[in-house]
Each structure stands twice: as C-alpha cells, then as structure tokens.
Image: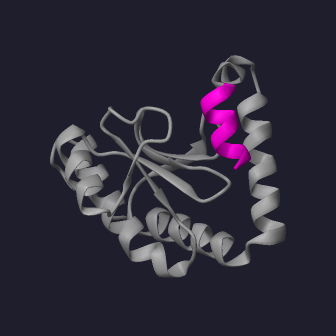
C-alpha cells in the first residue's frame, strides 16, 4: 500500500512544507472516488465528535484533520480513514493486545494508537476510542459537551 510505503520509507518528506497536506489530499480524493463507505464513516465520525464536544477541528501538520482542545491534540483523521489517537502507553498496550486498535503507524511504541475507519460499522468503536483519548488528554476530565 502506498500510504505505508510513504510513511515508512519516505518519512523525511514530511519535513517539506505543504507536502504532507498535498499527500493527504490525494488520499482523500482517492477515498472520495473509490471508497464511499469509508468516506461516509469519516464524515459521520467528524460530525459526531464536533457535534457532541466543544472541540476545534483544524488542519493537521501531517495532513488530514486534527481534533484539538485549545493547543492539546486529541487525535487526527487522515484522508484514507486512518484515525490516530493519543491514549497513553498502558491503554495502548491493552487495546492492541485485545485487537481493538493497532499500534501507531509511525510511532508504534508511543502512547498513540491507530484505528481504521473502513465503514459506518466502525463508527461506534472509533467514538469509544475518541472518548478515552479525550479523557486521557484532559487529565481524566470529560470534554464538556456543547450546550
């Protein structure tokens, strides 16, 4: 898969300004053209997260869309449906062991996890993982729901 090759073998390209965003835009176009269920799942995830929480959505430095509370990143979603969330090492280890998530695609030994949003059927699990990441990143506090 080209995403894996670029991330593993051409990681240095991420240091070139705007290139990660262009690469991710290509992933998004490919998803839009060839994988409508994945695109729908991504849209549903973004709408659910932004509709439930007081969260900021903005472009991520490595492409895709990032989800932030102030300057704290909860996670980001790439244009190919790969969701990366920071959950801490102990939770990462448990979720990977149980098969609920994958080690992060670039930093497998960190507190980050990766999760594939492939179809709307994956939405509930993605939202559960996001909830856990948001609690972890806000020191155990739940993100305040939008009122």
List the single residue furthest toward the bottom.
121
Residue 54, horizontal then vertical, whole percent: 40, 56
**Residue 147 visible in the current orientation:** no
38 left or right, relative to 34: left
For residue 128, above or below residue 114? below
The residue positioned 44% from the left and 46% from the top of the image is: 75
Residue 69, horizontal then vertical, whole percent: 39, 43
The residue positioned 59% from the left and 67% from the top of the image is: 42
**In the image shown, does 3 or 126 lie closer to the viewer?**
3
How many numbered discs? 0
**Residue 59 visible in the current orientation:** yes
The residue positioned 47% from the left and 71% from the top of the image is: 48
Q: Quadrant of residue 128?
A: bottom left
Residue 124, horizontal then vertical, whole percent: 39, 76
Q: Quadrant of residue 46?
A: bottom right
Where does the C terminus fall, quadrant-wise? Answer: bottom left
Residue 127, horizontal then vertical, whole percent: 38, 67
For residue 37, above or below residue 12? below
**In the image shown, does 34 or 146 lie closer to the viewer?**
34
For residue 107, above or below residue 45? above
**In the image shown, does 5 or 40 lie closer to the viewer?**
5
Q: How is the image coloured?
A: one colour
The residue positioned 46% from the left and 74% from the top of the image is: 123
Q: Which residues are magenta?
A: 1-10
**Type of secondary structure dominating the magenta stretch:** helix
Residue 54 belongs to the span the image colors magenta: no
């Amino acid at each position: 898969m080209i995403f894996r090759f670029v991330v593993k073998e051409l990681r240095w390209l991420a240091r070139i300004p705007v290139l990660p965003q262009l690469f991710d835009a290509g992933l998004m176009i490919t998803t839009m053209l060839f994988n409508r269920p994945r695109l729908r799942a991504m849209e549903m995830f973004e709408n659910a997260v932004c509709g439930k929480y007081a969260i900021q959505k903005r472009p991520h430095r490595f492409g895709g869309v990032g989800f932030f509370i102030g300057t704290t990143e909860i996670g980001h979603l790439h244009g190919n449906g790969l969701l990366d969330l920071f959950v801490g090492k102990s939770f990462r280890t448990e979720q990977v062991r149980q098969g609920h998530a994958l080690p992060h695609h670039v930093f497998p030994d960190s507190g980050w996890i990766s999760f594939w949003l492939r179809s709307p059927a994956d939405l509930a699990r993605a939202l559960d993982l996001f909830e856990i990441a948001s609690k972890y990143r806000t020191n155990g506090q739940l993100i305040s729901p939008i009122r």
